Amino acid sequence: MVCGCVDTFNTSTEKLADRIVVEGGITTQPPPYLVTLSSTSNFSQNIDGISRFISGAQITICADDGVCIPLFEVSKGKYSTAIDVARGEIGKSYHVKISTAEGKSIQSIPEKINASPPITRGYVEYDPVTLRDVGFQVYIDSEDTDQEKNFYKWETENFYPYSGFCFNRIYEKEIGRISSDKFIDGNTLSRVKVKSVPFESTSTWVVQVYQLAISETAFEYFDLIKKQTTTTGSIFDPPPSFLRGNLVNNSNPDEEVLGYFVVAGVSRLDVVIDRTVSGLSPRPFVGTVNDPIYCGVPCNTLCVAFNGGKCGNRPCPPDCALLSGKTNVAPDAWPYPHRECE
């Protein structure tokens, strides 16, 4: 007989304290300005997810001249200013002040709004080769300001038809789209890829490109996130390190606050993508059965196909506005006449 024994190995894991996470900012773009407040949680079967939104906080965005803008909770953990508040001004410094319902006092380190140079050119190239990004690649050029340390972050807002007179509207804040002028001071930021547009349809796509002039501290924060999320497991990967933002817990300075409150000047350029220019057929797009296809006026083939040959008779603007990520307001650069439903 063969006998074996098992030695029991008892181990325990350290339970980390929950940390508050802050995301938001103020720019020179028109308001409203948004702040999202959440809390991390230790993974457990007793919670719904890793993050929990925090309600009941009092939040204000304050300038160095003492003027503060209040934010109001519009949904759980999501706070917004009014749409008619003064926009951020170049040269002024801003910070956020947060008081939670539990009595915690959080404040960001003030940062100055720097001007973002204009985006001088936006252009589109069709890429039939790259497997991951096959489709239309959107690039921009911009002139860097001479003899200044400049740091940039690019974000996009995307519009393309959903159904009838309803548009999909998607805002993207990809962490990796950042750069500095360390090696190109005063020269052209050339061929900065800001968006990959899929070739799943021949319909028009509009990309609103936002170039944010962020602080050096913000750049270092996003750059560290970029490096730690693109590791390959090799010996050359950077060692893990704590992501320290610009937020401080005044109630308990030893308790770290995660996230970053961004203060930035912004320049914008709209790029229109004509997805018929490749001369090829788009890749097939498979919709989901539960997709709430919106029926505009007049009926279109997509709407008819999803509703058994019958078009819904719901009024356009209210239904479109109620759908998450949709809008019935055409982007400024939309090249075709656009009318609301009659």
Image: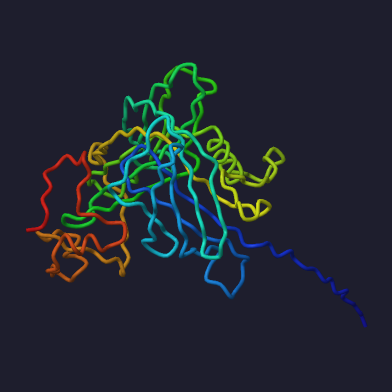
Q: Is 153 drawn above or below residue 166 in the view shown?
A: above
Residue drawn at x 27%, y 42% is 206
Q: Is residue 60 left or right of residue 29?
A: right
Along the viewing direction, whichever of 191 and 267 lies nearer the viewer: 267
Most foreground residue, 281 or 325: 325
- Against 166, is 67 above or below? above
The residue located at (23%, 39%) in the rendering is: 274
Point out the image quarter for the N terminus.
Answer: bottom right
Q: Position of residue 183 (x, y in %)?
A: 54, 20
Give the vertical position of 306 relative to 58 (above or below). below
Relative placement, left or right, of 214 versus 254 is: left
Residue situated in front as seen by the camera: 128 or 66 = 66
Image position of 280 (left or right of 234):
left
Answer with the quarter of the image where residue 320 lies: bottom left
Image point (18%, 63%), residue name: 318
User: Which x, y percent locates residue 173?
Assistant: 43, 45
Residue 13 x/y as whole percent: 74, 65
Which residue is farthest front? 66
Whole-percent x and y of residue 100? Answer: 52, 61
Please count the marks in the image.
0
Q: What is the residue that sits farthest to the left in this orientation?
A: 342
The quarter of the picture where residue 319 lies is: bottom left
Q: How is the image coloured?
A: rainbow
Quarter of the figure that contains the C terminus: bottom left
